Image (cartoon, rainbow, N blue to C red):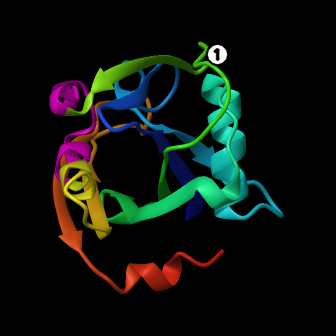
Amino acid sequence: MKKTTLCIPVTRSKILLGRKKVRWGAGKWNGFGGKIEKGETSEEAAIRELREECGLYTHENFLEKVAVLKLYINEDPKFLMHTYLVRIWTGKPTESGEMIPQWHSLKKIPYDEMWKADSIWMKKVFSGEKVAAHIHFKIEGTPGEDEEVFDRIEYDDSLWEDWKN
């Protein structure tokens, strides 16, 4: 199972999302993130991915842990995702090889153009909850090439223990 991060810049009224250009999730709006590299903490990876994918710079002290999500494909655990909100950064959102960043109103998050599960857990996060959950997808074919279908979400506070690198 791969450890990954997701970092979502937010202001009082807006959220910065990126439209994924390549690979798994292409065409969908998402936060900025990816795999945790050897020797990195989840916070270091979140900061690096934010910089690489949209050109924003932040510091570990400005990351707020809001979710830990374990993602499954056909019941096989694939990713443990450490999820952060960030409210303080420098730089201007810039398109990268992977993402096209765009600001959205927090009142009009484009959930219909995101992973189905995002509309469930993100609504909880933006209502002030911390989320720990198993998210299950089903797929016939190859992940990243064939359509993944959301199956279910199961909440499990014990996942906070898996947060540790």
Give the quadrant of the C terminus.
bottom right
Give the quadrant of the N terminus.
bottom right
Residue 126 coordinates in the image, percent (x, y): 25, 51
Q: Is residue 74 above or below residue 17?
A: below
Dominant SS type (magenta): helix
Q: Is residue 129 left or right of residue 142?
A: left
Residue 119 located within the stretch drawn in magenta: yes
Q: Residue at x 39, y 63 (%)?
A: 69
Give the residue pinned by disc 1.
Answer: 97
Residue 79 coordinates in the image, percent (x, y): 49, 59
Q: Residue furthest front?
A: 12
Q: Nearer the viewer, residue 3 or 13?
A: 13
Q: Is residue 45 above or below residue 51?
A: below
Q: Which residues are the magenta region?
A: 107-120
Residue 58 coordinates in the image, percent (x, y): 67, 43
Q: Residue at x 51, y 45 (%)?
A: 7
Number of marks drawn: 1
